[in-house]
Amino acid sequence: MQFELRLSVAAVLAASAVLAACGQKTETPAAPAASGGNAAAAPAADAQVVKLASVAPMSGSQAHYGKDNANGVLMAVDDLNQQGVTIGGKPVRFEAVVEDDAADPTQGTAVAQKLCDSKVNGVVGHLNSGTTIPASKIYNDCELPMVTGAATNPALTKNGYKTTFRIIANDNTLGAALANQAKAFGLKRVAVIDDRTAYGQGLAEVFAAVAKQNGIEVVSQQFTNDKATDFMAILTAVKAQNPDGIFYGGMDAQAGPMLRQMEQLGLTTQKYFGGDGICTTELAKLSGGSKPLLNVVCAEGGASLTKMPGGLAWRERYEKAFPGQFQIYSPYTYDATMLIVDAMKRANSADPKVYLAQLAASDYAGVTSKISFDETGDMKNAPSTLYQYVDGKKKAMD
């Protein structure tokens, strides 16, 4: 059964990557075995089809995040089909629609419009704030609920869109937590670098502001982009200011090479701070085992797996279905999928316009935490966790 699931998911992800350039979608009926349920629970062939979309970068340097996001949705869809869900007294068969936004705002809005036009029943995504923020307007205009478990820029929920929900802490929480940790370390001088994306810039601005409030001097502010691989000029300018800490607002595809280049320049004692974008299992590989990895402190919006209500058991199931693919967000995309369906069940309808009110009123006990929303669509009392890397593995700080 687990072997069958891996084949199904591999086919989905391979097809998604191939079709990304032309913007086509990949639809998959629920994969057959993530939950290990019995076939008798599967929905009838004539069941109502409910389509749930996963949108994330499935191609390019951030594809490992996107695949992890999609995996969470696929697991949830499989579990739901094994349960044999009924909505409004009718049996339902769930299908996942996996879309690639390539972490590009233009492609992200095109995908959002396509999902509106194709009338999917709900959206889990996007991953990047830079794609999620413009896409959120399109979803709002067509009254299609979207739940993100990854996009952290606070601006996402400031537009008053009733269809926008987030089940992870935002950058105000993460940036402040990192700056407060810098103070706890006794740092006096920090450099701030960001990739100029909505995510990276937003997180860097929060970190810098709170650092200054904490009496820490920002001695250098540098900029790069989310496609860069050469940071020698930036790091040379940073080194000249003799900081005792460096903050990077961006993703692991840039943070890994940056850590390697820091070692080349002798920047091996400085603490290195970043948000959930760098806080991945992949970072250790991308950094090539460089010494600065030992100095990394990164923040995630959520509890550690050991402190999530169902985290460890869920991770064990995930590894059986998708060995070696876990990054960060799949538990949240799993919960986001389940949350949408819970709202459908309570509304007795899979119609987005009908179940939206129930989604806003959610009080759902998920794998990651208990989920409810404030009036803006942000999660109430969203936790955050700081991590370090020990022996090349990410470990929560006590």
Image (tube, rainbow, N blue to C red):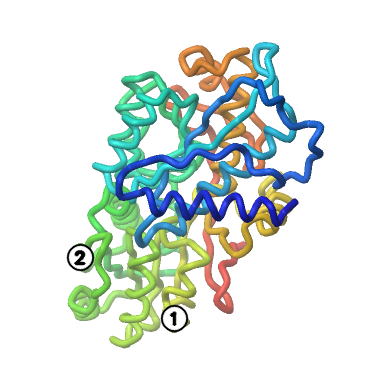
Judge left or right: residue 230 versus residue 4.
left
Give the residue pinned by disc 1.
288
**Relative vertical location of residue 245 with respect to residue 22 in this rendering, above or below:** below
Give the residue pinned by disc 2.
222
In which image quadrant can residue 383 be found? top right
Residue type beneath disc 1: Gly
Q: Position of 193 compared to 268: left or right? A: left
**Cα separation between marks 1 and 2:** 23 Å
Give the image quarter of residue 29.
top right
Q: Is residue 364 left or right of residue 262?
A: right
Residue found at x 33% / y 42%:
23
Provide the secondary structure element on which disc 1 rests.
loop
Q: Is residue 45 above or below residue 54?
A: above
Tell me the SS state at disc 2: strand
Q: Mark 2 and mark 1 in contact (Cβ < 8 Å)?
A: no
- Please tell me which of labels 1 and 2 falls first in the chain: 2
Q: Kindly identify the residue that appears in the image at 53 percent across and 58 percent down.
A: 327
Task: Evaluate whether residue 275 shows in this view.
Answer: no
Q: Position of residue 113 (x, y in %)?
A: 31, 30
Q: Amino acid at mark 2?
A: Gln
Pick the front one: 271 or 302: 302
Residue 141 spot, x, y in % from top left: 31, 20
Count of marks placed on residues: 2
| Image location of residue 124, percent across then percent down | 48, 36
Asked if residue 195 shows in the view, the reply is yes
